[in-house]
Image (tube, grey):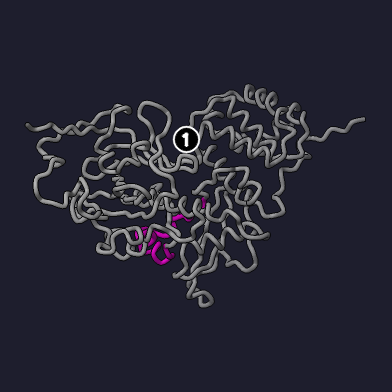
Amino acid sequence: MIVMKSFRDVSPTTPVTHGSPVRCVPARNNMDSPKKSPQSPASSDKATVKVCFPSGGFNLVKYGDSIDIKGIISIVTDRLSTVGERYYKKLYAMRLCRMSSKESYWLHQDMTMQQVYEKYIKKHPSSEWRYELRVRYFPSSLQDLCEKDNVTFYFYYDQVRQDYLSHPHLRIDQDIAVQLCCLEIRKYFKDMPQIALDKKSNFEYLEKEVGMHKFVPQTILNTMKSKSLRKSIQAQFKKYVGLSVDECMLKFLEILKVYFQFNQEKFKVELGSSWSVPVELVIGPEVGISHMNSQSAGTTKIADFDQIQAIQTLVSDCEEHTKATLQLKVAGAQEILFFTCPTLEVAESLADLIDGYYRLQTGSVTSIWNMKDSHSSKHKSGSKGVNPDNPTGTMLSEDYAEIVDEEGDYSTPASHEKADYDIFMGDITLDILKSETTVCEYLNAMYGSSYKSYINGYTRVEANSKS
């Protein structure tokens, strides 16, 4: 006689022994109670920060004002597991969110908690702010991440899954949503027999006691009938019953990546400074620093992360025409690469992202975006050695190039005498074109031949010859 296990008898996947962050990390004895006041005599020189995880868990860290964000991240990530250090610790970043207004700011690793307080926290009640630990700099190989740092892989999976389930406008086919649902059910109940979902009582338990919202986005639940969803899950589940927990997670991410680019961030900026061109930047481990093509779904690469030598963010000192500029010094390029951003926050977020990928891919522990002057002045600045004469990070005019090349090139003739290559501004016509195939002579002139294969044209400069 074969005894069948009831679905109720199958326990959810227990946390792995090396400290998977899928569930909340238990509070430790050496951690302060949340009710303990930071102003008490025992902790008058310390404060406590609550760092939240994508899975819903959190960790409390007691710190002094001099500790930086990198130190907070190190403490929290070490607590995710009791076995060894995180191999991929450089993937993590800290995000500060103001819940009432949905504002969010990525905190640079070298900022101290005192600087965070001065720049953000003191402007609004502390109860409105939330610190979030997230994976922001993504590895090129998920398989390698799973094998070398399983704890970070679990954390990353939780983050992607929660973003997928809570995304308000994600367009995904019902069949794909069902496949992802089956993979997550299989991971959640790793010992569940193949035919467990065939029993009506087991499925009702899954719906009522666990909740389908943990497996299927609300947009799908609102549009798909419960009976149809149940039949689809029963039909699809058998395909994944033989997979291990890690295999389920890898397959989940592989399928979802086609519909949800969770390993990329996009920014709408303007390329250039005086003659700027609207572009949508795409930043990620596979595309590097690229921009979207206007007539296709592909991207065009501008630079790789290991080519970046210095990063600087500047803000205009003109209050009537405030704008923020991100400047990148790229190896082999003749000129500085300019991106004009809608706000300083966007410029700093973009700078932090590129800086993080640079450290990850080069193995460097040193930032190429110097933040020392960003918090000592009304105006913000960036990178090491880019412009020591202007440490406040302001643009002295509407369009101002920070790095000055030597005289004698075609843009700045060494001689003041009229030369054959002189171009009179009155003879130049600028047309803004939407064609992706237009040759961008201006950009090639500004950024050199090394950018010819990277930047497709949006502008055209026509010089009328004089007799």
Q: Which residues are magenta?
A: 111-134
Amino acid type indicated by mark 1? Pro
Above or below residue 452? Residue 309 is below
Q: Residue furthest bottom?
A: 41
Q: Nearer the viewer, residue 148 or 221?
A: 148
Membership of 140 in magenta stretch: no
| Residue 86 locus on image (x, y percent) | 60, 57
Query: Which residue is depicted at the point 70% across and 29% down?
Result: 237
Q: Is residue 414 above or below residue 180?
A: below
Quarter of the view holding residue 108: bottom left
Position of residue 233 measured from the top left corner of the image (x, y, whole percent):
66, 27
At 33% from the left and 47% from the top, the residue drawn is 333
Determine the residue positioned at 33% across, 55% down. 312
Total number of numbered discs in the rendering: 1
Q: For the N terminus, which image quadrant?
A: top right
Q: Secondary structure at mark 1?
A: loop
Q: Is residue 98 visible?
A: no
Residue visible at 45% across and 50% down in the picture: 306
* Residue that mark 1 sits on: 168
Side of 166 relative to 2 (left or right): left
